[in-house]
Image (cartoon, rainbow, N blue to C red):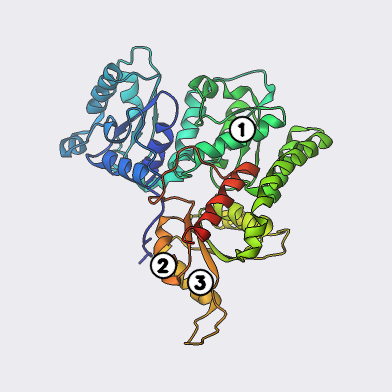
């Protein structure tokens, strides 16, 4: 019997598709799925993603075919045609995307035939088969991107040498996606480049439609968005590079140098940008040096999260903040080759730290991994265990932190104990916000 995943940190692939589309400007997903699927997804994405709200025509207002037993027996394509036509009549949008649930994928409904038969009145209607058994949120993100790149992005014969696209920061699954995209966009602007983030503030569907004009696609992940970027390159001829999500000086400086080399930017110019950002960063970071030393705020740390955040958080804690993040638990469902790629990101820390990296999809096992790493006190009065410690993870790790008797900060999905608006942790300036949050937790009860 296969092991089950207890306390998973993601919804199904249809949920990932819905979440991704829900933050794309003037886009409405149309669910071809069973009654209840949309409501369950809406609750998970709203309350567990920093209370982001439902947005425009999402959440409980999602249009859905509410597929019934009759549709399962006789097919639900006619019902889907009806739903597409009524949605276009009632909901003002510029793009409609049909996404599917498990049941309609299993019975083989041809959603593309239904889309062709629907009277769309000139509005673009796309389709993506996203039945939940296909994977998790990240799978839905990839499926939707591939569909958009294939059926919505217009081919471009000429490339804009000053335009890039960014993938890999997964909306809502990265609860801080909006702020992170703004911070990354600002960094690339300092290098002299215009950036399409597609899902961030100020983005438009025109940016997506004309994305093939970009000279480079930047995937801020080793695992999320890479397949979609490969499809983009095949369809539109735009090359891509994969770079780790950056937090703090060491991670962000390496990121800027990687991007500079890929774009052929003069090294002296890249270094000048780095120096300017470092000056700003350390001007503020130095302000807490006294309290950091006087109150002895250095901590052992356990980092729990996805492969994007885990490597970035660990490097920041070790190299920038001087903490000792000795255990990292990554909760993603990854292939072996993906695990090998992710493990490389935990090498070469400036601090010399080599954390123990554990791949475990069961979020309830974190305390067990801590006990195995530090051992048990056995009643020893001066046992050198996980103390002083800190848990950096999700809201699920609150129980683990309470059990260990240490503070905790939720920075990865799910987050139900914080409200997140435009806060971000990427880059130099995002690292300042993260430092504020970590230190505030430590001194909050003084």
Q: Quadrant of the N terminus?
A: bottom left
Residue in front for this viewpoint, 280 or 23? 280
Q: Secondary structure at mark 1?
A: helix
Residue 47 appears left or right of 339:
left
* Residue under pointer 2: 402
Residues under labels 3 and 1: Cα distance?
37 Å
* Residue under pointer 1: 185
Q: Secondary structure at mark 3?
A: helix
Q: Earlier in the sequence, mark 1 or mark 2?
A: 1
Q: Secondary structure at mark 2?
A: helix
Question: Which label was assigned to residue 284?
Answer: none
Residue 346 appears left or right of 132:
right
Residue 315 in the image, given as x and y percentages of width and height: 64, 56
Number of residue marks: 3
Q: Most extreme residue toward the left, as rendered? A: 70
The mark lying in front, picked from 2 and 3, is 2
Residue in front for this viewpoint, 176 or 116? 176
* Residue under pointer 3: 370
> Could you tell me if the residues under marks 1 and 2 are in contact, i.e. CB atoms within 8 Å?
no
Residues under labels 2 and 3: Cα distance?
13 Å
């Amino acid at each position: 019997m296969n092991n089950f995943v207890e306390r998973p940190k993601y919804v199904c692939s249809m949920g990932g598709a819905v979440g991704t589309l829900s933050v794309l400007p003037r886009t409405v997903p149309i669910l071809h799925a069973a009654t209840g699927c949309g409501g369950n997804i809406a609750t998970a994405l709203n309350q567990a993603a920093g209370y982001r709200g439902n947005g425009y025509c999402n959440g409980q207002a999602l249009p859905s075919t509410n597929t019934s037993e009759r549709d399962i027996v006789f097919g639900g394509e006619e019902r889907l045609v009806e739903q597409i036509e009524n949605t276009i009549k009632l909901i003002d949008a510029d793009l409609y995307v049909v996404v599917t649930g498990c049941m309609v994928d299993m019975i083989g409904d041809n959603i593309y035939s239904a889309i062709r038969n629907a009277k769309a009145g000139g509005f673009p209607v796309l389709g993506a088969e996203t039945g939940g058994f296909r994977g998790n949120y990240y799978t839905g993100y990839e499926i939707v991107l591939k569909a958009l790149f294939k059926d919505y992005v217009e081919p471009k014969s000429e490339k804009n040498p000053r335009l890039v696209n960014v993938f890999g920061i997964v909306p809502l699954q990265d609860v801080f996606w909006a702020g992170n995209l703004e911070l990354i966009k600002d960094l690339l602007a300092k290098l002299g480049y215009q950036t399409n983030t597609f899902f961030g503030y100020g983005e438009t569907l025109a940016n997506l439609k004309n994305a093939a004009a970009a000279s480079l696609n930047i995937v801020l992940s080793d695992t999320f968005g890479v397949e979609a970027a490969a499809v983009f390159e095949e369809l539109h001829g735009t090359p891509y590079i994969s770079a780790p999500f950056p937090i703090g000086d060491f991670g962000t400086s390496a990121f800027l140098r990687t991007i500079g080399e890929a774009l052929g930017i003069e090294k002296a110019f890249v270094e000048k940008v780095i120096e300017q950002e470092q000056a700003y960063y350390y001007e503020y970071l130095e302000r807490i040096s006294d309290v950091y030393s006087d109150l002895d705020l250095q901590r052992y740390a356990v980092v729990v999260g996805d492969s994007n955040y885990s490597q970035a958080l660990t490097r920041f804690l070790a190299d920038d903040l001087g903490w000792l993040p000795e255990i990292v638990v990554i909760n993603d469902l990854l292939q072996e080759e993906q695990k090998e790629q992710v493990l490389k990101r935990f090498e070469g820390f400036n601090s010399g730290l080599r954390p123990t990296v554990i791949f475990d999809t069961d979020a309830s096992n974190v305390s067990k991994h801590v006990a195995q790493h530090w051992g048990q006190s056995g009643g020893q009065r001066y046992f050198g265990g996980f103390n002083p410690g800190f848990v950096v993870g999700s809201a699920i790790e609150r129980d683990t932190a309470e059990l260990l008797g240490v503070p905790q900060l939720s920075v990865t999905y799910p987050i139900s104990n914080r409200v997140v608006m435009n806060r971000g942790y990427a880059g130099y300036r995002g690292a300042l916000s993260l430092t504020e949050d970590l230190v505030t937790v430590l001194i909050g009860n003084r």
